[in-house]
Amino acid sequence: MTLKLPEHRPLIAPSLLSADFSQLRHEIKAVEEAGAELLHLDVMDGVFVPNLTFGPLVISSLRPHSKLLFDVHLMIVHPERYLKAFAEAGADLICVHLEATPHVHRAITQIKELGKLAGLSLNPHTPLENLEYLLEELDFVLIMSVNPGFGGQKFIPSALRKIEKLKNLILQKNLPTLIEADGGINAETASSVIKAGADILVAGSAIFGKKDYHQAISELKSPT
Ligand code: DX5
Ligand code: ZN
């Protein structure tokens, strides 16, 4: 692992997808000041998911304006085509989807060779068994708790079982692998997600949809 993440848990990664896109520079500064540790950047290609967002150009133009760790979630087919571009744009963590390429192992190896933390994301229906020959290679696993493509969706409860099972697997094997949870996380769902074993919570609408980002992030860090 090249990069050290802060030790405390959970770490909060506001998802830029729910930010005001006419004010991106201001929005990332605001979540940084409000206590976030990472910035979650959802890259969508309109093929792997039915939506389009942004690419390396937007990420590289934001990079000089923030000290946050850039957590790039690639929802694109054959992500290996663009790993170098996202690394050069300033990503610190890069995550590809298990369902997006037949060459997952190669993509993970490439991310590590680029000196970035390598993550693998699983759609809600994808079983953990698919990680059997990969888990040891991963810096983190991103468990989707909604179907990827859009912000503001409802949390899928079976994600909790998946996080719990993955946490046990990681502990059993004594691995440093982190668990990131993404989708439908808010002040109500956060406590069970943390209890299940998630280290990093992604939240879009539950942060950018609120007036007070500091309060929103505090509520996610210590939910009641
Ligand atoms: C969905 C994205 C998420 C999304 C989360 O495909 O991966 O990161 O922005 O948004 P909320 O927190 O609103 O569910
Ligand atoms: Zn995401």
Image (cartoon, rainbow, N blue to C red):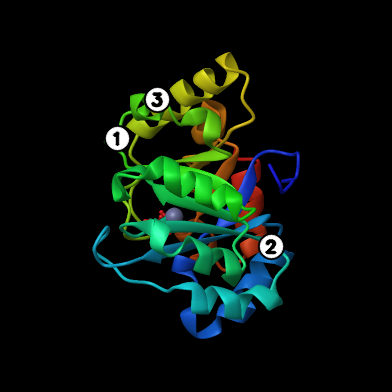
Tell me which numbered mark, 3 or 1, is placed earlier along the sequence. Answer: 1
- The spot of residue 164 in percent (x, y) is 47, 24
Label 1: few (<14), some (14–19) or many (≥20) C-alpha neighbours in 10 Å? some
Query: In which quarter of the view is residue 104 placed?
Result: top left
Cβ of disc 1 within 8 Å of ligand 1?
A: no
Mark whose residue sits in front, 2 or 3: 2
- The spot of residue 151 in percent (x, y) is 38, 60
Work out whether 175 lies above or below 64: above
- The spot of residue 8 in percent (x, y) is 74, 39
Residue at point 70%, 65% (across, down): 32
Left/right of residue 66 with respect to residue 15 in the rendered view = right
Q: Mark number for residue 126?
A: 1
Secondary structure of the residue carrying tag 3 is helix
Q: Which quarter shows the C terminus? A: top right
Can the viewer see residue 185?
no
* Residue at which label 2 appears: 68
Residue lying at the far top in this picture: please name it: 172
Cβ of disc 2 within 8 Å of ligand 1?
A: no
Cβ of disc 3 within 8 Å of ligand 1?
A: no
Ligand number 2: quarter of image: bottom left
Work out whether 114 lies above or below 129: below
Left/right of residue 48 with respect to residue 8 in the rendered view = left
Specify the amino acid type for callout 3.
Answer: Arg
Q: Which of these two is toward me, 86 or 153? A: 86
Specify the amino acid type for callout 1.
Answer: Thr
* Residue at which label 3 appears: 161
Q: CA distance from mark 2 to mark 1?
A: 30 Å
Secondary structure of the residue carrying tag 2 is loop
Tell me which numbered mark, 2 or 1, is placed earlier along the sequence. Answer: 2
Q: CA distance from mark 3 to mark 1?
A: 13 Å
